[in-house]
Amino acid sequence: MNTLQRYLEVIVDPTWDDFHANRNSARHAFLACVAIYHAVDRVAEAENRDAAHWRQVWGRESTEFRIIDVLAHHFKHVKSGPERIPKSRERLPIGRALDFNDAGDEWTYAICIS
């Protein structure tokens, strides 16, 4: 499952379908984001470039990928990189911005990403 095509078929597509069937589930949202985000690893290996390079390229080219990147890291690390800003600046936690409840375990509004 090292190729991008196989990874998309076996991991990403079914995980995305699970998320679509359970759009208010934080668990399904997280798993979909993580699965999609890690496609960069397969591209990096195939292209013999660092995954961070592809993460930056895809993030510049796709707002949706930037959101996936932030969500995948937010759920894993509690705060994503863009949320770690100086306390002197205003900030809005990404979970609240995307309408998760206070516990972070359920969406109060289903985001439409197609």
Image (cartoon, rainbow, N blue to C red):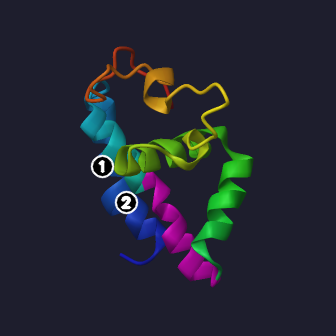
- Residue 44 at x, y = what percent? 58, 75
Category of crowding for the residue at label 2, using alpha-carbon neighbours closer than 10 angstroms: few (below 14), some (14–19), many (at least 20):
few
Q: Which residue lies furthest to the bottom in this view?
A: 48
Image-quadrant location for residue 105? top left
- Residue 10 at x, y = what percent? 31, 61
Amino acid on which the number 2 mark rests in the picture: Glu
Amino acid on which the number 1 mark rests in the picture: Pro
Q: Does the magenta stretch include residue 44?
A: yes
- Residue 70 at x, y = what percent? 52, 44
Q: Which of 34 and 10 is in front in this view?
A: 34
Q: Residue at x 35, y 37 (%)?
A: 29
**Element carrying mark 1:** helix
Relative to 9, say whether 44 is above or below: below
Image-quadrant location for residue 85? top right
**Element carrying mark 2:** helix
Category of crowding for the residue at label 1, using alpha-carbon neighbours closer than 10 angstroms: few (below 14), some (14–19), many (at least 20):
some
Q: Is residue 16 visible?
A: no
The secondary structure that dominates the magenta segment is helix
Relative to 40, say whether 84 is above or below: above
Q: Does the magenta stretch include residue 30?
A: no
Q: Name the residue under label 2.
A: 9
* Residue range of the region highlighted in magenta in the rendering: 36-48
Q: Which residue is drawn at 39% across and 55% down?
A: 35
Residue 24 is left or right of residue 46, and the answer is left
Q: Which of 28 and 2 is in front in this view?
A: 28
- Residue 50 at x, y = what percent? 62, 77
Which labelled disc corresponds to residue 14? 1
